Amino acid sequence: MIAINWFEVFLPTDNLCVYASNLTPGEQPPKPKSSLTYQTILRREEMKIYHLTDSQPENTFLEELDHKKYPSIVATCIEYGFALRLVEEAFIVILDRVGGKGLAGVNQSLKPDIYLTLEGIKFRCFYGFDWQQPYRWGLILSYISGQRFVISLKDQRLRDFAMGKHIVPIETDEEISGVLENVVEGFGILRRRKGDREKINLEEWTLPCNKQNLIGFLTYLNGSPFANEVSTKLQQDALTLTKEKRINTSLAKDQLDRLTHIMQRHNLFDFQLHLAEPQSAKISQKPLIIGN
């Protein structure tokens, strides 16, 4: 049996060398760090914090971790290492609670002055399959498509459509968000989840470009016929519809072929774990085969 989007990851050793710091009894742990280049993991049972970065933080020391004792830390290192490789190839990377996705622009938009079409990879790390190989590492990789607005809320058309809707900053994490409540003296009034309000620079914010918002905005601008044409094109980009506008009966195969093409074009089968002692990781060229 072939797991069509599960790819094995090969690591050069059975250990990771990371930076660590001790916690004293009763000490309040610092706020966790979670950026692409620096993550911290608290292990209360050991009274330690592990610092996953390649630049030594203050008051830390080197420690070697056995893969088998710290599988979740290894998984985190693999996910962030792959995410950084995507960034190096100019993908827009968005991290989720587990795994993440990387998207790059492609020239397939029917309205390039309004939105950009994207394609890329959704990823998450896994480990463990059976009693024979309980510490087999891999990445679940899936082809994804999407889009983003190339205009900000400075554009009155988008601003009018976005009023009362959820908006996001253009260049920062989507978790920093809220509802556009009003515009006063050229500034937007953002209402956050807890009810507090603040002024925002309209040039720095936009509407999330999910399919519902995009089709709604294009209907608002150009009417239903053009919006329907774009809707069909988005389904073709996602490979769920064929060029003949029929349901794609070989969706899984086509998505795997497209995923493999992206991986090869951007040389994503090799990446680094950015740790105290960096390690090279390799992804299998073909999906994992499970069982006989």
Image (cartoon, rainbow, N blue to C red):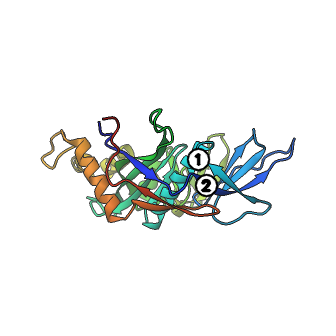
Disc 2 secondary structure class: strand
Q: In this picture, is 277 found above or below 66?
A: below
Where is 265 relative to 11, above or below?
A: below
**Residue 67: mark in rendering:** 1
Viewer-proximal residue among 189 and 184: 189
Circle 2 is placed at which residue position? 16
Q: Amino acid at mark 1?
A: His
Q: Position of residue 31 (x, y in %)?
A: 73, 49
Query: Does residue 57 appear in this view?
Result: yes
The reply to whether discs 2 and 1 touch (Cβ–Cβ < 8 Å) is yes
Residue at 25% over, 52% down:
257
- Quadrant assignment for the N terminus: top left
Is residue 268 shown left or right of residue 82?
left
- Residue 49 rendering spot, x and y as whole percentages: 73, 49
State left or right for residue 281 relative to residue 267: right
Q: Nearer the viewer, residue 65 or 25?
A: 65
- Alpha carbons under labels 2 and 1: distance apart: 7 Å
